[in-house]
Amino acid sequence: MKPWLLMHQRQLEFELTLIDVLKGEQKSPEYLKVNPLGVVPYMITPEGVGIGESNAMLWYLAHGSPLMPNDRTEQAEALQWMFFEQSKLEPYISPARFFTTILPQEKDARAEDIAKWQSQAEPGLHRLDAYLSDRDFILKSGYSIVDIALYGYVHVMDEAGISRLDYPEISRWIDNVAQTDRYHPLSELGQPSQQAA
Ligand SMILES: N[C@@H](CCC(=O)N[C@@H](CS)C(=O)NCC(=O)O)C(=O)O
């Protein structure tokens, strides 16, 4: 969702190919030729260079736009929160959501893991909630690349069985992001299997 939302908000032209991980399409020989790591998302730049990792894709796509902070300190803060997202939130919210919402038939069998991932996400979410208490967006200068990076998984925390109600500042920030110009909700992108269904 993250690069897709940023491209919409920057009004960039792009071609989207949905890869259905539930069908294992990310490991197909055709896809592995494009991205040998066999994961999504992946981006091919107009120059034909392949870029993996959603936050690296955001960095490329935000270049030269108001979504990329100009200030050196804010650029460092942006990177700090993007690494934080990948180390403290994504590794826990993503699998908890996957086995709760995307593959609910596995939910009971994975109940112990899900509970562990949910509690592992808590310290990061509490940190983010406290940080947002005196601001509308992550950076003082306003809505940026970092909000998009964090928003991707944080805004679907309920789908991972983690209640937004426990994080009032995050909830307020989620609403702020959803009100930014040319915002597009995840429901529009859908999950590949849901679209095929
Ligand atoms: N840190 C990467 C996550 C890449 C990743 O693990 N993608 C998952 C889906 S969100 C995937 O492709 N899983 C399928 C697999 O590992 O086979 C990013 O932010 O882009």
Image: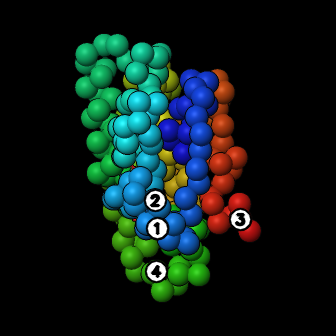
Q: Which residue is mark 4?
A: 111
Q: Residue at x 55, y 72 (%)?
A: 23
The reply to whether callout 1 and callout 3 are in contact (CB within 8 Å) is no
Residue at x 45%, y 55% (from the top left corner): 40
| Left/right of residue 191 with respect to residue 95 in the rendered view | right
Q: Position of residue 21 (x, y in %)?
A: 51, 66
Marks 4 and 2, Cα distance to the nearest angstrom? 32 Å
**Residue at the spot x=39%, y=76% of the render?**
113
**What is the secondary structure assignment of the residue under circle 3?**
helix
Residue where numbered disc 1 is placed: 28
Q: Nearer the viewer, mark 3 or mark 4?
A: 3
Quarter occupied by the N terminus:
top right
Callout 3 amino acid: Ala
Mark nearer the N terminus (4 vs 2): 2
Q: Residue 61, position in %: x, y?
A: 45, 28
Give the colouring mode of the picture: rainbow
Alpha-carbon distance for marks 2 and 1? 5 Å
Most foreground residue, 130 or 195: 195
Q: Earlier in the sequence, mark 3 or mark 4?
A: 4
**Residue 145 seen in the current view:** no
